[in-house]
Image (tube, rainbow, N blue to C red):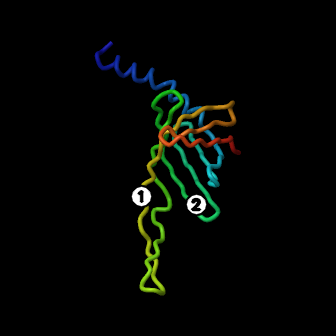
Amino acid sequence: MSKLALPALCAFLIAAPAGAQVAQMAGTWNGTFMGISLHLIVGPDGSFSEVERTPTVMTMQTGHLRSYQKGVVSFVVEDWEPKTMPVYHPTGTVGGYTTQQPTNKPPGGTYRITFQGTNQFTMQDVNMGGVVMFYRGR
């Protein structure tokens, strides 16, 4: 075995169980957090699309999941909407105007995933601690 093949094989064997976590997440999932409705779709290849809705606002993110260790995944955001948001600029005591300002790329995040059977899992933010329960959708 070459000197390069052994490190590559070790990296693959270490990553394989974590990759299995992403494969287990494949499907359509729904959850809520602090009044925000979450709709998450994870592809078998680790791609994801998430829509977040409140009564007045909707946002969307797409990207891919990256496994770091068993039970921990990071969402890597590649595209998002909206790309701009309206900002009101008051002028004087009455009136003003609105412009569109660019939005920043969402940061993604790293989460501890714990499955409770095949149809639900919790996702806990490893930095902030917030927990969301997701249920398999249709």
Task: Give the percent coordinates (x, y) of residue 62.
Answer: 50, 50
* Image-quadrant location for residue 124: top right
Quadrant of the image occupied by residue 117: top right
- Which residue was labeled with disc 2? 58
Amino acid carrying mark 1 in the image: Asn
Using the image as rendered, state which of residue 33 and residue 24 is in the foreground.
33
Tell me if mark 1 has few (under 14), some (14-19) or many (20+) residues whose alpha carbon lies within 10 angstroms of its own.
Answer: few
Q: Looking at this rendering, what residue extends furthest in the front direction? A: 93
Q: Is residue 98 above or below residue 19?
A: below
Disc 1 element? loop
Q: 2 or 47, which is in the foreground?
A: 47
The residue carrying pointer 2 sits among few (fewer than 14), some (14 to 19) or many (20 or more) residues within 10 Å by Cα, namely some
Percent position of residue 114, x then y: 60, 32
Above-or-below relation of 125 to 32: above
Query: In the picture shown, does residue 117 fall above or below 128?
Result: above
Question: Disc 2 or 1, which lies upstream in sequence?
Answer: 2
Q: At x 50% / y 37%, what residue is drawn?
A: 126
Looking at this view, is 119 or 90 the one in front? 90
The residue at which mark 1 appears reads as: 104
Q: Marks 2 and 1, how far apart in space?
A: 15 Å
On screen, residue 116 versus residue 42, left or right, reads: right
